[in-house]
Amino acid sequence: MLIESRPATDPEIDALVTAQQRELREADGGLDGQVTVTHDDIRYLAVVADGRAVACGGIQALDATTGELKRMYVRPAYRGRGIARQLLTALEELAFQRGHSVVCLETGVYLPAAISLYTSCGYEPIPLYGEYVHNPYSVCFAKRLPVAA
């Protein structure tokens, strides 16, 4: 397994984001407002297994010190192998390298596995922020990154 940087225009990133959004629509009953496009200002990482991208996630700068975790997704056939946890660690390192001291994220209240992953990795609940403020199906988390010694 390899974790590598990919551009937002990478076709495998696009396919993973599209699959993620399709799965989210099925999980949330098709709530309005789901976005199915990649963003040019997100720095993506892909997990590659057997020459194929099987997971992705990105960091988008909210401000100089805060990065937002975006589009984290592992193909269903690859779940249960610790890939999401390894990807999350790599995304936190990317955020740190980009000068962020905090990583925040939004997920759906209807995604208990995601919530469990984030809380088990040290993320703590925070108030809803940005575009999520008025979404009753959103829950937000943040984690302060360790300071370099």
Image: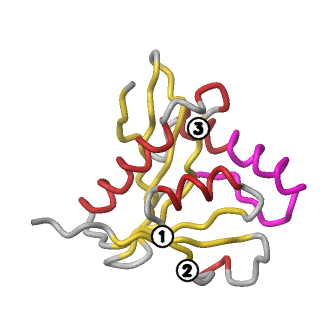
Residue 46, percent from left and from top: 45, 37
- Which residue occupies 63% across, 33% down? 75
- Between marks 3 and 1, how big is the CA–CA gap? 19 Å
Name the mark on residue 104. 1
Whether the magenta-drawn stretch holds residue 28 is answered as yes
Q: Quadrant of the C terminus?
A: bottom left
Q: Nearer the viewer, residue 111 or 54?
A: 111
- Tell me: 59 left or right of 111: left
CB-based contact (under 8 Å), mark 2 and mark 1 = yes
Residue type of the residue flagged with mark 2: Ile
Question: Which percent across, then down, holds residue 57?
Answer: 50, 48
Secondary structure beneath dot 3 equals strand
Q: Which residues are magenta?
A: 19-38
Side (left or right) of 89 relative to 22: left
Circle on res. 126: 2
**Mark toward the start of the polypeptide (3 vs 2):** 3
Residue 77: percent from left, percent from top: 65, 25
Judge the density around disc 2: few (<14), some (14-19), many (≥20) Cα neighbours within 10 Å.
some
User: Against 22, is 144 above or below?
Assistant: below
Check disc 1 and give the amino acid type: Cys
* Residue with the mark numbered 3: 74
- Which residue in the rendered view is the most extreme toward the left? 149
Q: Residue at x 70, y 55 (%)?
A: 112
